[in-house]
Image (cartoon, rainbow, N blue to C red):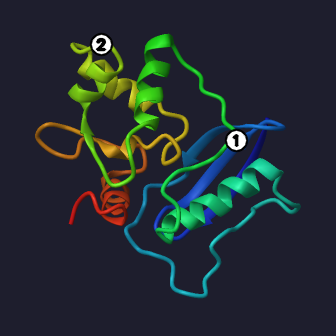
């Protein structure tokens, strides 16, 4: 497995882990500050010299398109890890359309475990492919809920998609 680093407007610093043909993980290196990069600033930064593998380059380009509101779905080859329950939750999360949100409770129901809404939150906390598997679109019944990239980033992504004002 290889690590690659990106800095993207609206998101911040990411560590991408890939194997030869798949994206394995996307990690937020630091919590989103809420400040966008100024126009003209670099939208990608590779900490190590060299060229990105094809799948990482594809991910970078699709993330940039998403942040410009030019992309609503990702076509990335990735590998999921986790229990059958976690994978069922992530599979259902991947089906949530751009611009829409669902509750943890509704997501648990869609995944076939209607009483497991708290475990659903834990499965999403362990989502290794945030944004691609859009766990930011899952909200609590009394608020936004949590997000590995921080609540500011969750709000930013939901605003970008028009889910919240």
Q: Is residue 23 left or right of residue 38?
A: right
Judged from this view, the residue extending furthest toward the bottom is 40
Q: Secondary structure at mark 1?
A: strand
Could you say whether the residue bearing mark 2 is in a helix, strand or loop?
A: loop
Q: Where does the image place residue 64, in percent across and percent down from the top left?
A: 59, 66
Could you tell me which residue is drawn at 75 percent across and 63 percent down? 46
Query: In the rendered structure, are the residues bearing label 1 and label 2 in contact, judged by CB atoms less than 8 Å apart?
Result: no
How many residues crowd around disc 1 within 10 Å: few (fewer than 14), some, or many (20 or more)? some
Q: Badge 2 local density, few (<14 within 10 Å), some, or many (20+)?
A: some
Q: Is residue 74 visible?
A: yes
- Can you say whether 10 is above or below 143 in the image? below
| Residue corresponding to mark 1 | 17
Nearer-N-terminus badge (1/2): 1
Q: Report the front residue among 144 and 113.
A: 113
52 is higher (above) or lower (below) than 41: above
The residue lying at 62 percent from left, 73 percent from top is 43
Question: In the rendered view of the protein, which quadrant contains the C terminus?
Answer: bottom left
Residue located 23% across and 15% down the image:
114
Residue plotted at (32% across, 59% down)? 152
Q: CA distance from mark 1 to mark 2?
A: 30 Å
Q: Is residue 59 above or below residue 104?
A: below
Quadrant including the N terminus: top right
Please tell me in which quadrant of the rendered image residue 105 appears: top left
Q: Nearer the viewer, residue 113 or 26?
A: 113
Marks 1 and 2: which is nearer the front?
Answer: 2
Say whether residue 6 is visible.
Answer: no
Q: What residue would you read off at disc 2?
A: 113
Residue 102: image x %, image y %? 26, 38
Q: Is residue 40 left or right of residue 157?
A: right
């Amino acid at each position: 497995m290889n690590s690659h680093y990106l800095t993207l407007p609206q998101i911040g610093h990411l560590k991408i882990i890939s194997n030869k043909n798949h994206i394995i993980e996307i990690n937020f290196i630091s919590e989103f500050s809420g400040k966008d990069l100024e126009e003209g600033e670099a939208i990608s930064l590779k900490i190590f010299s060299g060229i990105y593998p094809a799948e990482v380059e594809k991910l970078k380009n699709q993330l940039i398109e998403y942040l410009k509101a030019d992309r609503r779905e990702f076509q990335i080859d990735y590998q999921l890890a986790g229990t059958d329950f976690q994978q069922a939750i992530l599979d259902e999360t991947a089906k949530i359309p751009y611009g829409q949100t669902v509750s943890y409770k509704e997501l648990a129901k869609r995944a076939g475990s209607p009483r497991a809404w708290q475990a659903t939150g834990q499965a999403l906390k362990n989502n290794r492919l945030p944004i691609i598997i859009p766990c930011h679109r899952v909200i609590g019944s009394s608020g936004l809920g949590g997000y590995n990239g921080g609540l500011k980033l969750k709000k930013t992504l939901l605003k970008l998609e028009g889910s919240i004002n």
